[in-house]
Amino acid sequence: MGPDLQTLSDPALVVAIGRWRPEALAEAYRRHGGAVFALAQRVLGDRARAEDVTQTVFTSLWEAADRFDPERGSLRVFLLTMGHRRAIDMIRSDGRRRAREERLASQAEAPYDLEREVWDISVADQLRQALGELSEGERQAIGMAYFGGHTYREVAELLGQPEGTVKTRIRNGLQRLRTALADTGVEVS
């Protein structure tokens, strides 16, 4: 890392990151990584997960440096905001996973009901058929969000697509599923 990077302003440093200079990313991490990590650890209460958040934030900066707009605020605030959002997303995802696990555990403890099991199998078959009628983009986004437990933002990042596109595909796909299932007599709330 040359001394020139250490003297650059944060906006100039982000321009260097946008030009794929890894030493510029290292300098940004040196300047702001500790603050992002500390915030994530305070929110999550877990060192390993705070490290994951910090890595995700700086990976996002590397992949999309152009998202930083110095007119809207400092690089530190930008990175802290990304870190806070990611930490909150992790907490929400954990809550949904725990609720799902508790629901499954309570269902596992319920007495065996053949009629209910037949109905569930029938609904599962109808759902599988309805999913098959969705576009690949809708099916993939819905699968990652509802069956994979990912947030909209995580699905967008994993697919490399804008969050608005992912939300639209999920909303449209769910509406089509609801209509297809209603046509077969399955009510979806």
Image (spheres, rainbow, N blue to C red):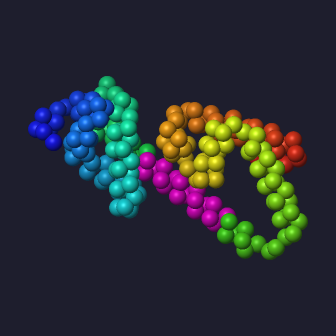
Q: At 76% from the left edge and 72% from the top edge, which residue is drawn?
A: 110
Q: Residue at x 25, y 32 (%)?
A: 16
Q: Is residue 37 magenta?
A: no
| Image coordinates for residue 49, horizontal then vertical, percent | 40, 58
Q: Position of residue 1 (x, y in %)?
A: 15, 42
Q: Does residue 73 appear anywhere in the picture?
A: no
Determine the residue located farthest toward the top in the rendered image: 71
Q: Position of residue 27 (x, y in %)?
A: 21, 42
Q: Characterize the magenta stretch by its predominant secondary structure.
A: helix
Answer with left or right where residue 47 lies relative to residue 165. Answer: left
The magenta region covers 86-103
Decide if residue 4 is on the left or right side of residue 127: left
Does the segment drawn in magenta span residue 91? yes
Q: Is residue 145 visible?
A: yes
Query: 161 above or below 125?
Result: above
Tell me if residue 157 comes above or below residue 148 in the rendering: above
Figure label count: 0
Q: What residue sits 36% from the left and 44% below the top?
A: 59
Q: Is residue 11 left or right of residue 99?
A: left
* Among the 4 quarters of the image, the one containing residue 25: top left
**In the drawing, does residue 101 fall left or right of residue 35?**
right
Q: Residue at coordinates 72% horizontally, 74% vertically from top-left?
A: 109
Q: Is residue 124 above or below residue 57?
A: below
The image position of residue 134, as x and y in percent, is: 72, 39
Residue 179 sits in which quadrant?
top right
100 shown above or below 165 = below
